Image: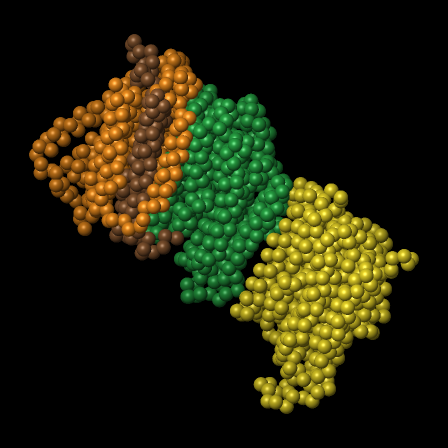
Chain colours: A orange, B green, C brown, D yellow
């Protein structure tokens, strides 16, 4: 059954991808990409990767699509027909694809429990992590402890992206005179938004702190919290949003998040452990792991929230500026 | 007490310094802080190099989880050597940057510049230190994202298209690496490099493993701008702010070369890559073509930064050539050239940046008559340029000597000859600029203005690099023995490498 | 037949990857390039998650009565990779916005015609 | 004669290299005071000459001298040691440096040249590198200073800063650097990889371990790699460098550059290949005939040139190949002739260039056709020119006689009658392109056509120039009657002798 669902979803993905190639209307392209993202999130669920699905849905279908739409608002939604022949790209793609198919011929069978990937390294995560780390969600254990350095890197990437976008687009000025948002006049929207936003933030907090037990964690929480503010900005206008969460504060928050994460790692130096070795944070190693994971997830959450929101602000500020002109 | 944590400090220090720079908020403070942190990283790297020369390899288990379950920092002589180059150049560039970006980057973005620079340094240090294939990808992306930002900070609008092209190519390259790492993972179940090496050795002619290698090599080739995947590099280096060009040209592609060395020699094993897959022939041909094509391109450009950018692609050809010679001597020559080329290109780009600061142009016309107006800057350019050409008593000569010797030892007479012929192009493209500077009357760009010598903060780092060019051209024992030790270490049988913990 | 059952997943994923890759290198519009890049990367993520699947397994969260779990390691890797992807997308799109402002167009051939990129 | 006997003999080598550098520094420091600057130049030149004489004295007394600076690469050092061939070249170069400096003072001031400080600075640098070349103990050291010589003379060639000067400089630098990097460095690396040493060793360093075809290829690479020896077809830089001021031409052609080239060839043949082994190398004959062809061809080209300096340049190309031919004849006596030709050609050619420069300064004439009747206005100069020409041709009682004599005897000894013929024909060609100049200057009536200058303005060259000319002209005579010190020195070179084999 799972294989059948998988096949159907993959088929739908293929159709979506093909449509994207041939469509000239960029708005539709972006929408299709959002669909693509959602479909792949479904596949991730089907393949037992719930955390990944959660992230893909919030990031791919959420943030990425919003940013793309924001860009389209500034650059126009029609793609001009290209006039240079697509032969070379086809050739490159053909060769690359052929190489991949060739490579797939010796791949371990899909889903076989005897695959090398399931025999080496991973068994320890599955068998020992609940005892070593004390968390039921193995993905969180691996993410936040065994491979916490990757996650630190990931936080740094988000921070780097925020710096990049800020340097390119700049943050909107807070004290700009408020402009009426087109959506503000829609009563239904306004009411629904006001209802949803507190719930969303609550949900974000739940995801943040429940990530140890179920799917979720700092990254997803940060994105969801940012989404709440983004929704607020969309409905009530950017100036209102920047009154609530100030851009300058976001910069500080993004920096602080990284520092919390790295600081947690460095603190272990002075307790006699290696970088990011949480065992030393409490007398009991498992408790230490727990404290460490909560701290670093907090760092991730703060940075992601601040970075995502400031990236959105930057894009929205551009759109605003264009509107004024 | 901190000594045991040295392997991770060159990553963690700049990583923490980057947000602090943002929090500091003031350009001057951020500059001072970033420079200090970078300098500190440099000293730690030197300490690491000395330790590894002594002990061989340093392993550091992050989170206290022993590899392969946790991520391992694994520093051997090769990584420590390149780490020294990267942190050293970074420190000098930061000193240099203060005056340089004052002109080229908007004031409000100075702290962002320092933060991005430190993040780039974080990424590069991470790539060099890590012993985990996926972790390498993460750090690669940190450095890349920071790099796109740095390139796009320039005031010339062409930097935007250059950065975009760089971003697309860079992401394709990174994704290829990701595909390759995935293929390795599915066959071995591990991501730790040493563990991978031991497990890959069991496969012989496995199609998935072969394809994984191919994707990794192509991906890394994009990152290191191997001909014909180099087209992103000249625009990026040309239009980036001068301090960024100086930093990237002497570090970013070098680190990518290091990644290639790491994958070929540590993970897959030279035997597998070169004998089973015959990659040496492909690399060799591409390297030779790169040397000739891009050296030639360098001779016909009028923008001096473009000249240097094409020259960089050609010089990368020399490094790859050394690797593709399939010998310890060849690898050593490649690694040595990583080191020496960083010294030359850093100094050259710094000199060009100083010229831009004073004349507002980097066209060859702006250089006319500068020999008299900016004597110290042009003298620095001249000496570093002679080093690129490979004139004796400069670092460039030493590289070339070892490269040709390595080729001759393998009986590759024609290749050795081609390497020497290739360096003749350098005479032309460096010679043109020097002739303009010393034997031509000032052009309309420089004529009217009262052009002064570059400020001290730019001259000092520039001349440190120039003197290093001469020092390492005469007193070669340090650089050569380090490169030699690195190549010995990398070319030893994989089994012993894993044993030496 | 078992051959196909073993590999169909990878092959379709390869097709998706190449579709994305094709968009990246052939598209003229910079926004579409970024979309292509995302499709390319998302497909690679699917390859990783496919590696982690164990037939009959369930999500790697400890639960009563479940003995077979899918491999959590690829999930962790892809979580990181997704974040890297969105970060790249954000910077890329910001560049597109700036390019539009500087050149007045986001069609690659149009600004290539205007001035040489080098 | 040894006034530096108080010093450790090996220190003398360091001093010969460092003293000109000090001179260069002094020139820069005193740049604002031309008189002091020139005094410094001459003083340093004289000191250097005495140093070289001390080294020569030590060499005659069989005192070994060697010094090592740094280890550049494992097993390869920047090292110096003294051997007779180097001493001979050092004597010539350091002596002529004094004379050239004196001459240059007159010329540069007479011409009101700009950038005189840079000129004298580079001049001193060049002589420093020449000293290093003379005493190099291995090929790498020689190569390094060979390259530095090219670089330090480049600003001299482009001195004028005109487009023609820049073009000339480009050709100069282009050919010299290209050949040295592409061929010479390649040959050195090949030697290093296959033999494992680059030290100059009497009798050569190649053993039976190297295949003969490999050694043959190396010989070709060396001959062409040493572009300063101007073997055709890589001779173009020499005429191109004629745009330089005349003292530079004199320095390039007689003292430093070209002589460094042929010196290197001799050194490689004697100490890397070994004269006796040359007969076994297949390409030695090929290169020999290329040398012979260069001798004849460039003489023919010289005849077509009306510009005096261009004619002299091609004459130099031709004369250099005498030395190459002598080196490759595989005969000890020919090698002696080649070595002696370094000396005799130096004094002869420098005289000719000095005269050309004097004519330029005093009468502003470049072309030979304009010099008709000039002998009456500038008698001393033209007499000196005639003496120099006779010496180049090789007629007694001039110095050139001896070197040609030994070359011909050497050719006979190795049964290469073609070479004997070439040398003879070449001498006749020399007569044809050199002698008409003084003859027309003295015996033809003054050209009555209207000229852009007036004859009444023309007078003899400035005094410093005349002094220099007189000295070198005298040397042409003296070396005919008293060549013994040089011949003694040559006989000290291992494998080289002025006596026939079998004679004692």
- Residue D70: x percent and y percent? 68, 45
Q: Residue furthest bottom?
A: D448
Residue A40 seen in the figure:
yes
Rendered position, A15 above or below D102: above
Quadrant placement of the N terminus of chain A: top left
- Residue D242: x percent and y percent? 62, 69
On screen, residue B301 versus residue A303, left or right, reads right
**Which corner quadrant of the image does residue A72 belong to?**
top left
Q: Total number of numbered labels? A: 0
- Residue B255: x percent and y percent? 47, 38
* Residue in the image at 32% along x and 40% along y: C22
Rendered position, B61 above or below D321: above
* Residue in the image at 30% along x and 20% along y: A48
Residue D344 seen in the figure:
no
* Residue in the image at 20% along x and 41% along y: A27
On screen, residue B403 versus residue B441, left or right, reads right
* Residue in the image at 65% along x and 56% along y: D225
Q: Residue furthest front?
A: C1
- Residue B12: x percent and y percent? 43, 31
């Amino acid at each position: 059954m799972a294989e059948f669902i998988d096949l159907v979803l993959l088929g739908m993905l293929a159709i979506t991808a093909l449509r994207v190639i041939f469509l000239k209307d960029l708005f539709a392209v972006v929408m299709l990409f959002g669909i693509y993202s959602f479909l792949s999130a479904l596949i991730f669920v089907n393949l037992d990767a719930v955390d990944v699905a959660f992230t893909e849905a919030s990031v791919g279908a959420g943030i990425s699509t919003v940013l793309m739409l924001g860009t389209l608002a500034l650059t126009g939604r029609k793609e001009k027909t290209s006039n240079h022949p697509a032969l070379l790209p086809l050739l490159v793609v053909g060769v690359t694809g052929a190489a991949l198919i060739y490579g797939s011929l010796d791949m371990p069978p899909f889903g076989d429990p005897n695959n090398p990937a399931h025999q080496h390294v991973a068994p320890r995560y599955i068998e020992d992590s609940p005892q070593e780390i004390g968390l039921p969600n193995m993905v969180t254990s691996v993410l936040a402890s065994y491979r916490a350095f990757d996650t630190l890197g990931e936080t740094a990437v988000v921070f780097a992206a925020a710096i990049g976008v800020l340097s390119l687009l700049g943050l909107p000025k807070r004290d700009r005179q408020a402009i009426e948002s087109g959506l503000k006049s829609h009563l239904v929207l306004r009411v629904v938004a006001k209802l949803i936003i507190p719930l969303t933030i609550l949900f974000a907090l739940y995801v943040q702190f429940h990530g140890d037990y179920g799917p979720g964690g700092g990254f997803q929480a940060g994105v969801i919290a940012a989404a709440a503010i983004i929704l607020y900005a969309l409905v009530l206008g950017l100036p209102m949003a920047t009154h609530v969460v100030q851009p300058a504060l976001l910069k500080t928050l993004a920096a602080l998040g990284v520092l919390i994460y790295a600081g947690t790692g460095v603190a272990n130096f002075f307790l006699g452990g290696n970088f990011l070795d949480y065992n030393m944070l409490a007398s009991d190693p498992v408790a230490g792991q727990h404290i460490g994971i909560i701290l670093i997830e907090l760092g991730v959450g703060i940075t992601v929230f601040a970075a995502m929101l400031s990236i959105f602000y930057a894009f929205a500020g551009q759109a605003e500026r264009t509107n004024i002109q | 007490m901190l000594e045991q944590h040295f392997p991770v400090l060159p990553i963690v220090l700049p990583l923490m310094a980057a947000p602090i720079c943002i929090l500091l908020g003031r350009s001057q403070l951020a500059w001072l802080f970033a420079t200090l942190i970078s300098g500190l990283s440099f000293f730690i790297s030197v300490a690491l190099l000395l330790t590894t020369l002594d002990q061989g390899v340093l392993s550091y288990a992050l989170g206290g989880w022993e590899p392969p379950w946790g991520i391992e920092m694994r520093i051997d002589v090769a990584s420590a050597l390149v780490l020294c180059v990267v942190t050293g150049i970074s420190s000098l560039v930061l000193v240099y940057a203060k005056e340089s970006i004052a002109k080229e980057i908007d004031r409000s973005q100075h702290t962002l510049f320092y933060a991005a620079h430190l993040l780039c340094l974080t990424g590069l240090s991470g790539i060099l230190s890590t012993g985990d294939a996926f972790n390498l990808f993460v750090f690669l992306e940190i450095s890349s994202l920071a790099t796109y930002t740095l390139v796009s900070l320039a005031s010339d609008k062409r930097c935007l298209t250059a950065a975009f092209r760089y971003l697309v190519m860079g992401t394709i390259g990174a994704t290829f690496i990701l595909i390759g790492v995935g293929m390795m993972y599915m066959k071995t179940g591990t991501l730790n490099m040493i563990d991978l090496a031991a497990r890959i050795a069991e496969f012989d002619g496995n199609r998935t493993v072969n394809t994984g290698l191919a994707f990794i090599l192509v991906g890394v080739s994009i990152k290191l701008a191997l001909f014909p995947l180099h087209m992103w590099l000249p625009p990026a280096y040309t239009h980036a702010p001068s301090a960024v060009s100086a930093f990237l040209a002497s570090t970013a592609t070098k680190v990518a070369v290091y990644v290639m060395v790491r994958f070929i020699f540590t993970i897959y094993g030279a035997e597998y890559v070169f004998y089973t897959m015959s990659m040496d022939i492909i690399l060799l041909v591409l390297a030779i073509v790169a040397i000739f094509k891009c050296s030639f391109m360098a001779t016909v450009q009028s923008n001096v930064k473009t000249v240097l950018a094409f020259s960089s692609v050609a010089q990368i050809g020399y490094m790859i050539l050394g690797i593709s010679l399939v010998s310890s001597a060849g690898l050593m020559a490649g690694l040595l050239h990583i080191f020496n080329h960083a010294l030359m290109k850093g100094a050259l780009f710094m000199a060009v940046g100083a010229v831009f600061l004073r004349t507002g142009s980097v066209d060859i016309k702006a250089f006319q008559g500068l020999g008299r107006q900016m004597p110290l800057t042009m003298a620095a350019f001249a000496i570093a340029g002679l080093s690129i050409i490979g004139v004796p008593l400069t670092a460039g000569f030493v590289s070339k000597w070892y490269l040709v010797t390595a080729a001759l030892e393998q009986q590759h007479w024609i290749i050795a000859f081609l390497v020497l012929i290739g360096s003749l192009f350098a005479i032309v493209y460096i010679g043109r600029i020097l002739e303009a500077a010393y034997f031509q009357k000032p052009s309309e760009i420089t004529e009217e203005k009262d052009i002064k010598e570059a400020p001290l903060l730019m001259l000092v780092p520039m001349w440190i690099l120039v003197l290093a060019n001469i020092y390492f051209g005469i007193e070669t024992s340090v650089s050569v023995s380090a490169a030699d030790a690195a190549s010995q270490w990398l070319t030893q049988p994989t089994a012993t490498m894993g044993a030496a913990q | 037949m078992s051959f196909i059952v073993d590999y169909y997943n990878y092959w379709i994923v390869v097709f998706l990857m190449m579709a994305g890759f094709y968009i990246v290198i052939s598209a003229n519009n910079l926004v579409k390039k970024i979309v292509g890049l995302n499709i390319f990367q998302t497909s690679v993520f699917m390859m990783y998650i496919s590696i982690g699947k164990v037939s009959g397994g369930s999500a790697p969260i400890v639960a009563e009565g479940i003995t077979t779990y899918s491999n959590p390691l690829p999930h962790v890797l892809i979580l990181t990779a997704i974040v890297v992807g969105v970060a790249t997308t954000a910077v890329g799109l910001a560049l597109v916005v700036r390019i539009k402002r500087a050149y007045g167009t986001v069609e690659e051939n149009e600004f290539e015609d205007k001035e040489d990129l080098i | 004669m040894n006034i530096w006997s108080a010093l450790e003999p090996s220190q003398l080598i360091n001093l010969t290299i460092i003293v000109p550098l000090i001179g260069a520094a002094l020139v820069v420091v005193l740049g604002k005071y031309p008189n002091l600057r020139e005094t410094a130049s001459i003083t340093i030149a004289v000191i250097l000459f005495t140093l070289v004489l001390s080294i020569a004295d030590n060499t005659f007394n069989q005192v070994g001298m060697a010094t090592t600076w740094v280890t550049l690469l494992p097993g390869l050092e920047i090292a110096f040691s003294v051997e007779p061939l180097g001493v001979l070249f050092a004597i010539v170069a350091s002596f002529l440096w004094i004379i050239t400096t004196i001459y240059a003072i007159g010329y540069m001031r007479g011409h009101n040249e700009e950038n005189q400080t840079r000129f004298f600075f580079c001049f001193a640098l060049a002589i420093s590198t020449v000293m290093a070349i003379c005493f190099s103990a291995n090929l790498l050291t020689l190569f390094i200073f060979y390259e530095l010589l090219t670089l330090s003379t480049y600003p001299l060639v482009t001195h004028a800063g005109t487009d023609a000067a820049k073009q000339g400089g480009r050709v100069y630098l282009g050919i010299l650097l290209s050949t040295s990097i592409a061929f010479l460095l390649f040959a050195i690396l090949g030697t290093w990889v296959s033999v494992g040493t680059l030290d100059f060793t009497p009798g050569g360093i190649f053993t039976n371990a190297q295949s003969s075809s490999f050694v043959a290829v190396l010989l070709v690479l060396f001959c062409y790699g040493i572009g300063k020896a101007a073997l055709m077809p890589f001779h173009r830089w020499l005429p191109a460098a004629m745009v330089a001021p005349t003292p530079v031409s004199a320095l390039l052609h007689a003292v430093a550059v070209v002589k460094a080239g042929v010196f290197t060839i001799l050194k490689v043949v004697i100490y890397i290949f070994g004269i006796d082994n040359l007969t076994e190398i297949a390409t030695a004959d090929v290169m020999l005939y290329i040398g012979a062809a260069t001798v004849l061809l460039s003489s023919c080209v010289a005849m077509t040139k009306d510009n005096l300096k261009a004619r002299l340049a091609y004459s130099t190309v031709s004369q250099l190949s005498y030395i190459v031919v002598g080196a490759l004849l595989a005969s000890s006596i020919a090698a002696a002739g080649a070595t002696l030709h370094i000396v005799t050609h130096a004094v002869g050619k420098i005289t000719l260039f000095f005269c050309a420069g004097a004519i330029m300064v005093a009468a502003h004439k470049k072309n030979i056709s304009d010099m008709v009747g000039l002998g009456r206005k500038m008698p001393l100069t033209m007499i000196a020119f005639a003496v120099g020409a006779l010496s180049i041709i090789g007629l007694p009682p001039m110095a050139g006689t001896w070197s040609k004599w030994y070359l011909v005897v050497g050719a006979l000894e190795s049964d290469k009658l073609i070479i004997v013929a070439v040398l003879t024909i070449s001498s006749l060609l020399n007569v044809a392109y050199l002698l008409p100049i003084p003859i027309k200057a003295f015996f033809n009536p003054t050209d009555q056509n209207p000229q852009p200058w007036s004859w009444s303005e023309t007078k003899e060259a400035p005094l410093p120039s005349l002094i220099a000319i007189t000295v070198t002209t005298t040397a042409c005579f003296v070396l005919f009657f008293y060549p013994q010190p040089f011949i003694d020195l040559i006989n000290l070179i291992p494998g080289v002798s002025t006596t026939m084999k079998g004679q004692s």
